[in-house]
Image (cartoon, rainbow, N blue to C red):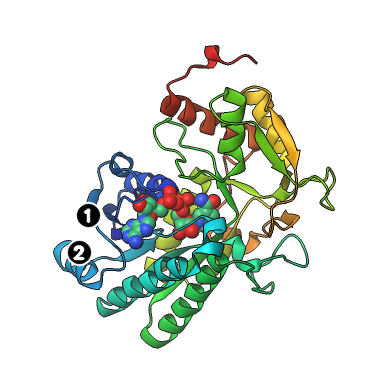
Amino acid sequence: MSKLLVTGGAGYIGSHTVRSLLEAGHNLVVLDDLSAGSEKAVGSATLVVGDVGDREFVRSVFSAYGPFDGVLHFAGSIEVARSMVEPLDFYETNLTKAITLLGVSVEHGIKAFVFSSTAAVYGIPESQPIVEDAAIDPINPYGSSKSMFEQVMADAGQAHGTGWIALRYFNACGAHPDGDLGENHEPETHLIPLAIAAAAGVGQSLQLRGTDYPTPDGTCVRDYIHVTDLAAAHVTAIEGLIGGASSGVFNLGTGVGQSNRQVLEAVGRVVAPVPYDEADRRPGDPAELVADSRAFRAAFGWEPKASDLDTIVASAWKWHQSQWGISTDAIAK
Ligand SMILES: NC(=O)c1ccc[n+]([C@@H]2O[C@H](COP(=O)([O-])OP(=O)(O)OC[C@H]3O[C@@H](n4cnc5c(N)ncnc54)[C@H](O)[C@@H]3O)[C@@H](O)[C@H]2O)c1
């Protein structure tokens, strides 16, 4: 059993990881400012509410609750479109505040630091599936802020011996099978929750953005990875680092691409037909993003277990029903 600090553990991916870490027997302190997360989502972990960029506050958390064996850093700003219009805010949250956390971690001799990175570091990749040493060429401040912090971790690791892993998630999706944890972004920009909302009649008709991409059905292709598979990857990564595994960056995806139309079909099978309008491409959306995650599988023996589309949509639907207070009977299939 290890004692771990989890920033952003009240948010979507963080809360699922908190649950998996608790189930694995670890002792957790969650640091979250609750700007986007929920107190309920941390379960029996200790929750400390505050800003990960407040150095004195973070130091006080390390002093009061440490020593920690490792840190998992999820806290951050995630809306790509907002990063285009408020880049300074993004760099402050995703880079400056992350450096503050890493700095305090180094002060306390932390040897295991796991960071939430993203496929957005690759920008518009030249080939698929994407391997970790593909060119890093982000096309928005969100992706840039993440790739810059990867570099900061690599340099700090070199200088201070901090073991680190950056996990580059592809499309995180789905919800906990228990139905009590899930995605609750505000604003919601992700396709699956928007499609479920449209199908259930609680959201607007879906805008299918871009139908003329060079893909088999003309819509964007993405690699959807169930949030419980991501959570399991974090447990393996932090335990591995604490056990002496090497630092590095790893893609987390299934290696299988699904088009936007295939996602709508899955929502149609599981929930109800999705009302949608075809619309222009969204600026900056690459045609295809599919992960080559063989490196993480080989290093940590991880395999996605819940990442087929129907399982993803069914779990998300269960969660949204509990949030919206509607039953399956209320939906005309
Ligand atoms: N959701 C995805 O598809 C996706 C994909 C790739 C990478 N990521 C990364 O994974 C991480 C988690 O994403 P998520 O979808 O769970 O987001 P989320 O918004 O649900 O969770 C982020 C959590 O961080 C907290 N937080 C934000 N700023 C903070 C601050 N300054 N101090 C303390 N807490 C703060 C929020 O309250 C929230 O609980 C993010 O770093 C994100 O960039 C997410």
As shown in the figure, which amino acid type bears the numbered disc 2? Val
Q: Residues within 10 Å of mark 2 (few under 14, many from 20)?
A: some
Q: Residues within 10 Å of mark 1 (few under 14, many from 20)?
A: some
Residue 138 visible: yes
Q: Which residue is mark 2?
A: 61
Residue at 36% in and 70% down: 97
In this view, 249 is above or below 230: below
Residue 231 shown left or right of residue 7 in the figure: right
Total number of numbered labels? 2
Residue at 69% in and 52% down: 282
In this view, 21 is above or below 51: above
In this view, 328 is above or below 216: above
Residue 265 in picture, x, y percent from top left: 72, 31
Looking at the rendering, which quadrant does residue 93 occupy?
Answer: bottom left
Looking at the rendering, which quadrant does residue 105 occupy?
Answer: bottom left
Residue 282 shown left or right of residue 144 in the figure: right
